[in-house]
Image (cartoon, rainbow, N blue to C red):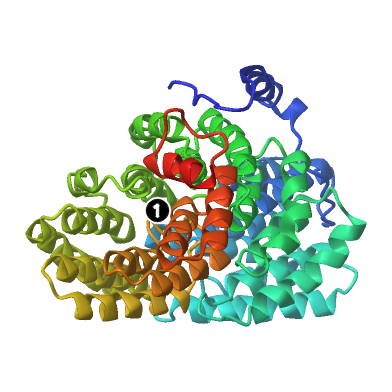
Amino acid sequence: MALIQPARVVLAVLTVFAFQHQHPPGEQLGRVEFATSCRGVEAEFNRAVALLHSFSFSTANDAFQGVLAKAPACAIAYWGQALGHWGNPYGGVRSAAAIVRGQTAVEKGLATGTPTPRELAYLRAVAALYKDAGTVDQRTRILAYERAMADVARAYPDDMEAAIFHALAIDQTALPTDKTFAQKLRAAAILEPIFAKHPDHPGLAHYIIHANDAPPLAPRALEAARRYATIAPSAPHALHMPSHTFTRVGRWQESVDTNILSAAAAVRDGVHAEALHAMDYQVYAYLQMGMDRDARRLVDDAPGILAGLDTSAVGGAAPPLAGFYAAAAIPARYVMERGAWQDAAALVTPATGTPQADALTHFARAIGAARAGAPARGRADLDQLEMLRARLVELNDAYWAEQVRIQREAAAAWIAFADGERTGAVARLTQAADAEDATDKSAVSPGPLAPAREQLGDMLLALDRPADALAAFEAVMKKEPGRFRAVYGAARAASLFGDRAKARARYQELLGIARTADAPGRPELDEARAYVR
């Protein structure tokens, strides 16, 4: 497997990192102290929980198994394995195999040794994630788990780990449609005061980033984001997770730098879905900065990483879904962000069996065909999007079914626009943008391939409605700061509207975002330089 090449971080830094952290003696996972009744395995147990906090699930499960090898009566180790089998709390609907593995771990824990009442409380809490999984929907079980962890935290107020895992359980219940962010704020209110006292705890930094992973909240997580990678640099996800915050606030180079290290660490550890996930965030950042050649290298690297993806393994923070999603998103982003519509229409259709991943390619193909002037070519992709949406409904995955519906509506709007149905196209794309704004992106993605409201701005510009287009682009800039196409669109719209001061400011902003862009680079940057001059 070829090493993923960094663009801005000195290769020697990456090499030193890779070799320093290949073996446990050099591990840096942060400081965790989880009290148990198991004797002689304290260090091993704390290491396993530290890995769990950084979503290194496969490695954590192995570590808990190591604890059991030394202390077979350590029932609470099965609690750790049950959480490991559950995997990423933000990872979508669990597979039947994961449910069986988790249930087995819970059953073993409840039948092993003589756990303390506190340890039993942890085991019974995690059991709620799996109880009656064949008849009770996943969200109901997640809510039951949160209530159970609330009981544990209440019963053991001096147990910092109970509070931390409870906060994560709270955030796991947050709905993407809740724009009050009540659950996220509730989780952050638990975590932030503890982090002030324990700044080297990996779970605190990690979960603060998640609890603030929404556009209005992200600035609150910058300190945790900048610390997490230094707390647990041996965990690939600890190197990636800061980029969730960096992406939300438009700090593209910081996102690139941390994801270079994360992808390399993930490949080293054999967690290829995690590597692809980091590469997707990295590509997204490169494209905002106009560094298209660097993005292209990752487009070329991605298939080789995907070939090593093991869907049967417990894996790391990124489940197989995230790997398939990233593998589809990376080439689609590369063409969509650059407005290469003919290339978008020619993307190779996937067959991963992961509907939300396959939908990305059909979405890009349909819009590419329409915007390249061949709308008839995109209608088959619209049909595929509807089939994929229906499949997600069958899987009871309401979130992704809605995301694919929004994609289909946006693509259908562009096809209608290309067919001359201008008024209907604008209405349809406006509805898609409103629906997208009512929800939020999944943690599996740095952002949509093309935000619906940004596309609406493009369509309004094509209709010579620059004032309306400007409003659309500026709405995107507020929600997703630093997006190349939104900032350029705002500059172009302001120029056409006659607001020269705003146009100049937006063009200057674009040049700042893309100050490290390829040379020669995109024509939008030449336009910006000419306007500013």
What x and y, as percent, mark residue 493?
42, 63
Q: Residue at x 49, y 22 (%)?
A: 3
Tell me: residue 56, above or below residue 449: above
Instruction: Please state which of residues 336 and 22 is positioned toward the viewer in this rendering.
Output: 336
Asked whether, in this view, residue 283 is left or right of residue 87, the answer is left
Per the image, the residue denoted by label 1 is 321
Q: Residue at x 19, y 45 (%)?
A: 342
Instruction: Please state which of residues 281 and 21 is positioned toward the viewer in this rendering.
Output: 281
Instruction: Please state which of residues 427 and 307 is positioned toward the viewer in this rendering.
Output: 427
Badge 1 amino acid: Leu
What x and y, as percent, mark residue 136?
44, 81
Quadrant into which the N terminus falls: top left
- Count of numbered badges drawn on the protein: 1
Instruction: Please state which of residues 144 and 247 is positioned toward the viewer in this rendering.
Output: 247
Tell me: residue 204, above or below residue 4: below
Tell me: residue 422, above or below residue 265: below
Residue 231 occupies which quadrant of the picture?
A: top right
| Residue 118 in sight here | no
| Residue 351 in sight here | yes
Q: Residue furthest left?
A: 376
What x and y, as percent, mark residue 268?
55, 28
Q: Residue at x 50, y 56 (%)?
A: 487
Residue 62 occupies which quadrant of the picture?
A: top right
